[in-house]
Amino acid sequence: MKRITVLLAEDHMVVREGLRTLLEAEGDIDVVGEAETGRQAVEMTRKLLPAVVVMDIAMPLLNGLEATRQIRKAAPGTRVLILSAHSDDEYVEQVAALGAAGYLIKQTSAHILSRAIREVHKGNTFFGPNITKRLHLQTRPRSTQGGPSQKKVGGLSSREVEVLQLIAEGKANKQTAVELGISAKTVEKHRARLMRKLNIHDTAGLTRYAITAGIIENSVQLTIA
């Protein structure tokens, strides 16, 4: 039997270790890598081409939603299964619009998680019972025109979303430049473009916007005025 290759994208080591132990106890699942940031998840997916990525939303440096978008573009054959502590309607809508294969909350049992991995690997979708109910109740004509995720971030490019997240996480221009492999001058240009597009004129405003758009969590940045 061919084993299902899985990449775990989760920033908490103890959670990753627990997930690895649970999944590798299954006879048909092989955890081939672990990523602790969204950016690392994208890079490892390009390199390893796992069958399934189990992705948390609240990831540092690059959030799970943007990481999912980039993975879907870079590795179309890889299926993304969201495993998050959040079950907010906005997150569910964004995940569905991005083309993730499934969404589970972290209270899910190991049995359901392994079943979800098998289902998405077959090409099916798998959403937890509560999530499925919400999706059926929602009418989302917006998703055929780019989905709520694009509206939530004001038409920003992927690179602009990356820069916005790093700004909101408190990274200086030089730190952002190193993280993205670009010059500090280019970061400054992206920052200026963000402020112009969003009609926001300071870092605190950009951070508040990032929280509202679901790019970072409230707990990430605690020093907003």
Image (tube, rainbow, N blue to C red):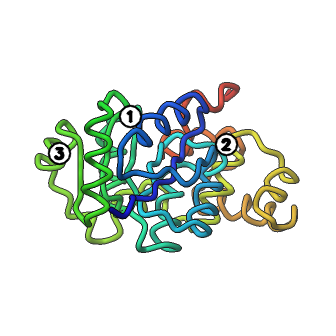
Q: For the residue marked with disc 3, what is the amino acid? A: Thr
Q: Nearer the viewer, mark 1 or mark 2?
A: 1
Q: Percent from the top left, x then y, of residue 174?
A: 88, 53
Q: Percent from the top left, x then y, of residue 36?
A: 63, 43
| Nearer to the camera, 170 or 35 | 35
The local crowd at label 3, few if under 14, some if 14 to 19, many if 20 or more residues have their Cα within 10 Å, is: some
The local crowd at label 1, few if under 14, some if 14 to 19, many if 20 or more residues have their Cα within 10 Å, is: some
Q: Percent from the top left, x then y, of residue 223?
A: 70, 26
Q: Secondary structure at mark 2?
A: helix
Residue 122, image quadrant: bottom left
Separation of marks 1 and 2 at Cα, in angstroms: 20 Å
Separation of marks 3 and 2 at Cα, in angstroms: 32 Å
Give the numbered dot on residue 86.
1
Residue 179, image quadrant: bottom right
Q: Secondary structure at mark 1?
A: loop
The image quadrant where one finds the N terminus is bottom left
| Nearer to the camera, 175 or 54 | 54
Residue annotated with mark 3? 132
Pointer 3 or 2: first along the chain:
3
Separation of marks 3 and 1 at Cα, in angstroms: 14 Å
Q: Residue at x 32, y 35 (%)?
A: 87
Q: Is residue 8 above or below residue 4?
A: above
Residue 128, image quadrant: top left
